[in-house]
Amino acid sequence: MATGPRYFVPFRRRHEGKTDYYKRMSLLSSGTPRMVVRKTNRQIIVQLVVPEVEGDSTLVAAYSAELAGYGYEGSTASTPAAYLTGMLFAVKALNAGYGEAILDIGLARAKPGARVFAALKGAVDAGLDVPYGESILPDEERLKGAHIAEYAPERAGDLVTNVEAVALAIKKELV
């Protein structure tokens, strides 16, 4: 192991590949709550997080597993699920009195059309004020699940109309 006066030991979470402290500091310095989007192998998680001295505090959270309660029948880790989860998150945040946020995708790659940006599009469509650029958002066909219904019609069924129906059901909860 390297030693000496010029050797720098990185922070533990940076060493583990969990946190980019430079990006985190720039997000925290804005003073706006963060819309944290995380994707796992099975679901999409969207949270509204504010920093506190003891650690970050989660104010509102939405999980793609909750979409089954609205009648969603597709995969909970897909692009349409991310879109609907973002929409559900925005409705919860707006009902709780939070109207704006900034996007925090963590260590996920910022690839145009990615699922994290589908969640962003869902939140923006529901009325949450989040700054973004149009070029990163997925196509409308991908948000509705047309690409899934095209290559797997026997599994997807009528996914496009299901996504539209769930989106309407979620928007009805907006107070």
Image (cartoon, rainbow, N blue to C red):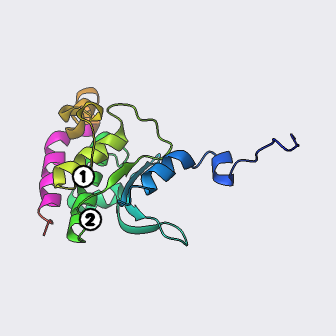
Judge whether residue 87 is colored magenta. Answer: no
Query: Of helix, strand and loop, which one carries label 2?
Result: helix
Query: Of helix, strand and loop, which one carries label 1?
Result: helix
Depth check: give the residue in front, 21 or 63: 21
Q: Which residue is mark 2?
A: 93
Report whether 156 appears left or right of 46.
left
Q: In terms of secondary structure, what is the magenta stretch mainly?
A: helix
Report whether 43 appears left or right of 160.
right
Report whether 164 appears left or right of 22.
left
Report whether 27 appears left or right of 112.
right
The answer to whether mark 2 and mark 1 are in CB contact below 8 A is yes
- Looking at marks 2 and 1 on the same chain, the residue that comes earlier in the sequence is marked by 2
Q: Position of residue 109 (x, y in %)?
A: 46, 35
Q: Quadrant of residue 63?
A: bottom left
Who's the residue at 26% across and 30% down the image? 135
Depth check: give the residue in front, 171 or 6: 6
Q: For the magenta stretch, what is the residue range?
A: 156-171
Residue 75: mark in rendering? none
Q: Which residue is mark 1?
A: 123
Q: Position of residue 95 (x, y in %)?
A: 20, 69
User: Can the viewer see residue 172?
Assistant: yes
Name, please, the residue furthest toward the top.
Answer: 151
Say if 116 sits above or below 97 in the image. Answer: above
Depth check: give the residue in front, 161 or 84: 84
Q: Position of residue 139 (x, y in %)?
A: 22, 32
Depth check: give the residue in front, 148 or 120: 120
Badge 2 amino acid? Ala
Badge 1 amino acid? Ala
Image quarter where the N terminus lies is top right
The CA distance from mark 2 to mark 1 is: 9 Å
The mark tally for this picture is 2
